[in-house]
Image (spheres, rainbow, N blue to C red):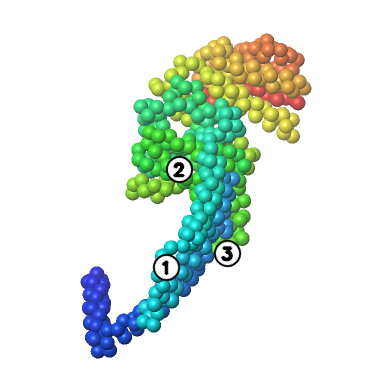
Amino acid sequence: MLGLIIFGIIAMIAVIIVQLSKVSDLASAIKGEETSKLRANNRTAFWLVIFMVVFLVFCVVSALYYKNSMLGYGPHGAASSHGVELDGIFNTTLIITGIVFVITQILLFWFSYKYREDKNRKATFFAHSTQLELVWTGIPVIVMTYLVVKGLFVWNATMADVKPGENVIDIEATGYQFAWDIRYPGADGKIGTKNFRLIDLATNPLGQDWSDPKNIDDFMPTEIVLPVNQKVRVGINSKDVLHNFYLPHFRVKMDAVPGLPTYFVFTPTMTTDDYRQRLKDYPEYQVPADDTDPEGPQRWETFDYELACAELCGKGHYSMRKVVRIVSQEEYDLWLQQQSSYYLTNIRGTDVDPFRDDKLLGIEIEQRKEELTTQFTELMESDVESGVINLENVFFESGSSALDDVSQYELENVANLLKKYPNVNFELSGHTDSQGDESANLSLSQSRADQVASFLRGLGTSSDRMKAKGYGESAPVESNDTAEGRQANRRTELKIISK
């Protein structure tokens, strides 16, 4: 019904225009064609000037109104080092072309008014002026040369790749319908190789080649976290259609092309918290982020940098938005420590693991060392005189006190830590689950504690500092009714007596 009404209104307007045209023709015939034409020219010239004024005012007012939200001014200045240069060349171009635009519009409409038809005025025939041609050719050439040369300098600086040996964080972004897979290198600082033929959506979404040692410590976080004032190189890929890696606040925009890896290098210069504080100074951000919750956080408090796809890659295009956090170096280092290798979490020990027959990899040995060192150091630096450390990576053969081969790494780390703190006295405590005979379990736990003590003595730890005691099944930490609980109860502990 609404469509029918709109159609009727449009039809009526068309009829009115036709009738007005007929009335105008009739009036011209009555008043005289020449007089009517002059009046029409004068009227058109006058309204063209009015249109020019309204049009230019609209352009200026709309630009001022939207400059903060859409044009990158005010609170949304660039938050990257190269972004400042890009904004600078943009501003220069805008000023120059803006001046030309205003002058051109004024002359265009003013000439339409000034040189409208006048029977008392005769046109002057102007054939040629070399000086004028030099002016209107030379000035644009000079201005365009300046803009192009300045733009080239900015472009070359922005698009330059990193130099060999340069301190840079190397990450990878792979777009697909409809999300991003973000991959970081581990402690080695290198991203592992991949092959699209190895892609398995369930276990290997990027097609990582697990035989490449560089892949072992790579991790795939759910968010992008980067340290401020640190150069970042983003390798950009796509698994299906054309996407676009777009970080508007950092002036980063690069296509993700299937089969054609691209990259972008940038340095963020403002943390998320600093950017929020900048937004706080603007009235439009001092309003509730949620209109339905007037007492909730304000807009500036909920701001986040974002990664968006700037290509229309399908109906789920909008869902490719991803939060980007820029933090201090200390926060970034802490975040790194909390990340887990994708390989160790999802691939290690499975049928697709090329190293499944290896008991321990170098990265696992290093991780265990870091975990034990952290536990030991925290305990030693605390105000508590005593404490217990569970030696989680000390293992024995089933039903025996013989140490498993992989236990040597844990005990070597223990020996090195004890050398660092020579005043520490401690007890090695052996524990079992409740399976089997209680007295046999007590004997087994004592034998295992003695075996660990003997191993540490062989590494140079003095017998005067330690004692070994077996507790059997008397001190469980979990229920013995489940396999998981029994496994937790079979343990060896290092109990600090004095430090």
Front in this rendered view, residue 496 or 71:
71
Disc 3 + disc 2, Cβ < 8 Å: no
Q: Which residue is mark 3?
A: 283
Q: Residues within 10 Å of mark 2 (few under 14, many from 20)?
A: some
Amino acid type at mark 1: Phe
Q: Which image quadrant for residue 331?
A: top right
Residue 381 x, y percent position in the rendering: 72, 32
Q: Which type of secondary structure does the marked residue at label 2 adopt?
A: strand
Considering only vertical position in the picture, is 104 above or below 219?
below
Q: Which residue is mark 1?
A: 126
Which residue appears at 55% of the width and 44% of the height?
Answer: 153
Q: CA distance from mark 3 to mark 2?
A: 33 Å
Give the total of numbered labels.
3
Front in this rendered view, residue 476 or 137:
137
Q: Which residue is mark 2?
A: 254
Q: Earlier in the sequence, mark 1 or mark 3?
A: 1
Front in this rendered view, residue 475 or 353:
353
Residue 101 x, y percent position in the rendering: 47, 63
Q: Which type of secondary structure does the marked residue at label 1 adopt?
A: loop
Q: Which type of secondary structure does the marked residue at label 3 adopt?
A: helix
- Give the quadrant of the N terminus: bottom left
Q: Would residue 430 be seen by someone viewing this image from the given angle?
A: no
**Residue at the right extreme of this rendering:** 423
Which residue appears at 76% of the width and 20% of the height?
Answer: 422
Disc 1 + disc 3, Cβ < 8 Å: no
Which residue appears at 58% of the width and 38% of the height?
Answer: 231
Amino acid type at mark 2: Met
Left or right, 355 with reference to 226:
left
